[in-house]
Amino acid sequence: MAANAFQSSTPMKTPNPKNHSSASRRAPPPNQMESSVSAVADFKSRFEAYNRLQAAAVAFGERLPIPEIVALGGQSDGKSSLLEALLGFRFNVREVEMGTRRPLVLQMVHDPSALEPRCRFQEEDSEEYGGPIVLASAIADLIRSRTEAHLRKLQASVSSKPIVMRAEYAHCPNLTIIDTPGFVLKAKKGEPESTPTEILSMVKSLASPPHRLLLFLQQSSVEWCSSLWLDAIREIDPTFKRTMIVVSKFDNRLKEFTERWEVDNYLSANGYLGENIRPYFVALPKDRGSVSNEEFRRQISQVDAEVLHHLRDSVNGGFDEEKYGPYVGFSCLRQYLESELQRRYKEAAPATLALLEQRCNEVSIELARVESKLQATSDVCHLRRSAMLHVASICSHMVALIDGASDPAPEEWGKTTDEEQSDSGIGSWPGVTVAVKPPNHTLKLYGGAAFERAMHEFQCATYSIECPLVSREKVANILLAHAGRGGGGGLTEAAAEIARAAARAWLAPLLDAACERLSFVLKSLFDLALERNRSHDSDYWRKTGDMDGYIGFHAALRRSYNNFIQDLSKQCKEIVQHHLSSVTSPYSQVCYENDLVGDVGRFNQLSATSFVLDLSDAKDEMVADQENIPPKDQQHSTPGKATEAKDALRESQMTVPETPSPDQPQDVYGVKKDTVNLMDIGGRKRQARIITSGRNLEANRNQNTSILFGAGNKGSRTGSSYAEICSMSAQHFARIRQVLIERNIPSALSAGFLTPCRERLFVALGLQLFAVNDEKFMDMFVAPGAIDVLQGERQSLNKRQKVLQSCLNEFKNIARAL
C-alpha cells in the first residue's frame, strides 16, 4: 500500500506531551466542530447500513462486495488480543480456540450511551439477532457451543460459515473485522491431519474477494525473510495493494535496539516488503488477569506510551519519528483502520446501491414465480396442461437420446462398461468366467449408443460359452432310452438332446441378464432427459410447463417411467425365453437342417453388412463382421472342460458307428460324417453342418443290439461313441446359439425395448399420470412436501426481499446525503 495513502488518513507524527503547549489544545472553531459532527453522523449512518447489509448477506448467502477487513495470521500471532483491544474489553476469545474452527465477524458499533458493552449474536440461518449478552464468559461459551454444534452437524473440523457478533460500546470504534482461523503447521491432538490444509484453503477463500482488506499479523520475533505466512499472503495479494501488515508483540523486540539506524532499519522492513509498504508496529498488555474494562483500556494506552518512550529515550539518537511515528502504537492502527474503512464505505456506496437494486429486482421476479406456482396449485386445468407439456418434453428428449445425442456431455453423464456393471448391480454375466470387453468398453456412453454396446457385450458373453461335456452315465442313459424306442439316428438324437439341455441351462440366465442390463441403460436416461430439459428449456416451456418444486409429481413421473421400462423388461424376458424354448424344442429342425451351406452363406452375407466401430483405442477403422465375436483371449470353453473338449473334438473327425453304447468301438457299419466347420478363432462366425443318413431299420436294430452287448474288437478301436456324442452336441449347441444370437434375439430385444420407447412412452406415462380423476391427480401436487417446499421458499424470499429493500432504502438516503 502506498505511503501517501497511509499519510492521508493517519497523523504524520505521534503526539508528544512534552512538546505540546496549551495553545495547541484549544478547541476548534464552531464551524469546524459542526462539520466534524456532520461527518461523524454520515459515517455512522453508512456504517449501520453496511452492517445490516452484511447481516443479510450472511443470513441469505448473498455475495455482495461489501468493504470488509479480514484479519489473518498464524496461531498465537496476537489476532485475538488485537480484537479485544479494538473492542475495548476482554471476552477470552483465545480460550474458545475459535481461531482454528470458524470465522468470527465482529461488528463494532460506537454507541456513546453504551457505558457497558452490549453483545448480540446473529441467529444461525437468519438475519435476526438474539438478546444482549453482558457477561464476557457467556460470550466465550456461546462461541464455543455454536462452533462445536455446527462442526458436529457437518462432520468436519473446520467451517467457513461465520459467527456474527454485534458489539455496541462507547469505547469501541465503528469497525467490522472478520477474524479467521489462525494458520497452523500441524493439527492439534484429536483433529484430522488435513486440518492445517483446510484452514489455509478456507482463509484464502475468505481473503480472495477484491473488496476485502487484509489485516495480516506477524510476531516481531519472526524475520521477514523466514516468514511462512507472508508467502501465503503474497499468493492472495502479490503487491500488498489491499494488505495492512501489523507486527505484533513489538515490545519483545525493543531490547535489541541500541542505535537509531537499527530501529529505522527494522521499521522500514529492510526493504523486504517494498519501498512504499509501511507495516504497523503494535504492543498490547501481556497481563491476562481479571481486570476491569477501564483498567484494560488504561493498560493499552500505557503500553503505547512505554514503547514510544523507549524508542525516544533508550535508543541512541531515537528514531525517525516523522517517517515512522504514524505506524507505531495501537492507537495509530485503530485510527487508520476506522478511517480507511470509512473511506472505502463512501467509495463503494454507489456500486452497492446499483447492486442492491439489481438483487431486489431478481428476488421480486423469483417471488412472483413461486407465487404463481402456489396459485396454480388450485387450478387443476392449468396444472394438467403444464404437467402434460412437461411429460411431452421429457419424452421427446428421451427419444433424442435413444436415437443419438451428444448432450449433456457424455464425459460427465455417460458410463463405461465397468461402470454400467457396477451401478446396475448385475455384475458379471452368469456362467462367464472370463472378462467380456466389447468394442468401446472404455468410452462413456449413454442412450442408444450404450444400448448397442450392451447388446454386443451380451453377444460376446454368449459366444464365450461352449457346450459343457456331460458324464458317461448321462450319455448312456440317453442312448439306452433311444435304443429302447427303436429307430435310427441314436447318436444324433442323443447329441441333440444334450445340446438342447445345455442351451436351456446356460443361455437362459444370459438372456435374463441381458434384459436387466438393457433396462438399466434405459432407466438411466431419465436423469439425462431432465438435464436436457433444463438446458434446452425455452421461454415458452418455462412459462407454460415449469414444474420445478412439485416433488410429488416428479416422484410419480419417475416411478411411472421406471414401471414402464420394468414392464418392457418383463415382456422381453418372456419373448426371448420363448425363442429359446422354440429353438431347443425336440420338434425344432435347427439341429437337422441339411442345406446349411446356403444358410451359412446367407448369414455371412448378412453379417458383412453390419459392423462395429471400435473407438476405444482411438482407431478409425471399421472392424467388420465382429459384433458378436469376442476377442481371441475370451473364446474359452466351459471351465474345467478345456482339455477333455479338445480331445473330444479331435475324435469327432473320425468315422464312428451309429450306436447307443458310449464305449463301443467303431466299425465299418458306422455313419460317414462330414467334417464340422467349428469355431474359427479369427473373425469368422461358428458354423455347424450336420448331414444325417437314413438307415434300414432292421440293420440298425441288429447293429445296436450287437454293439450294446459288447460285440466287436476293442483292440482295434480308434475312437469312442462318447467322444463322438460330445463332438456332435458341441456342434448342435453352437448351431442353437448361432440361431438365437444371429436371427432371433437382437431383433426381439430392439423391438421389445426401443420401439415402445419411441412410439408408446408418452401414451403410457399419460395413462398412468393423467387418466385419473381430479382428486387423485391433485394428490401429486398437494402431497406432503410439495406445497410445504413452495411455501417455505416463498417465506424465505419474502424475508429476503424485505431485508434487501430496507437496505436499498437506506443506501438511497445515504446517496442523497452524499
Image (cartoon, helix red, strand yellow):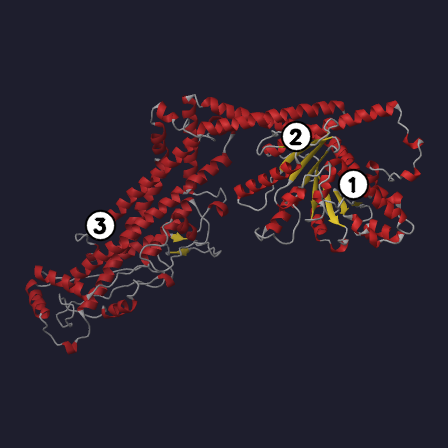
**The residue under label 2 is which amino acid type?**
Leu
In this rendering, position of residue 492 left or right of residue 55: left
**The residue under label 3 is which amino acid type?**
Ser
Extreme residue in the bottom direction: 715
The total of numbered circles placed on residues is 3
Report the Cα–Cα distance between label 2 and label 3: 75 Å
Q: Tag 3's secondary structure?
A: helix
| Residue lying at 33% horizontally and 27% vertically, measured from the top left | 771
Foreground label between 2 and 3:
2
Foreground label between 1 and 2:
1
Residue highlighted by disc 1: 299
In this rendering, position of residue 496 left or right of residue 377: left
Q: Nearer the viewer, residue 207 or 721?
A: 207
Residue 629, compared with residue 288, is above or below; it is below
Foreground label between 3 and 1:
1
Looking at the image, can residue 2 be seen? no
Residue highlighted by disc 3: 581
**The residue under label 1 is which amino acid type?**
Gln
Q: Which mark is residue 53?
A: 2
Dots 1, 2 in contact, CB < 8 A: no
Where residue 718 sits in the image (x, y, percent)?
Answer: 19, 75
Q: Nearer the viewer, residue 726 or 702?
A: 726
Where residue 154 sits in the image (x, y, percent)?
Answer: 53, 42
| Residue lying at 69% horizontally and 45% vertically, measured from the top left | 72
Q: Tag 1's secondary structure?
A: helix
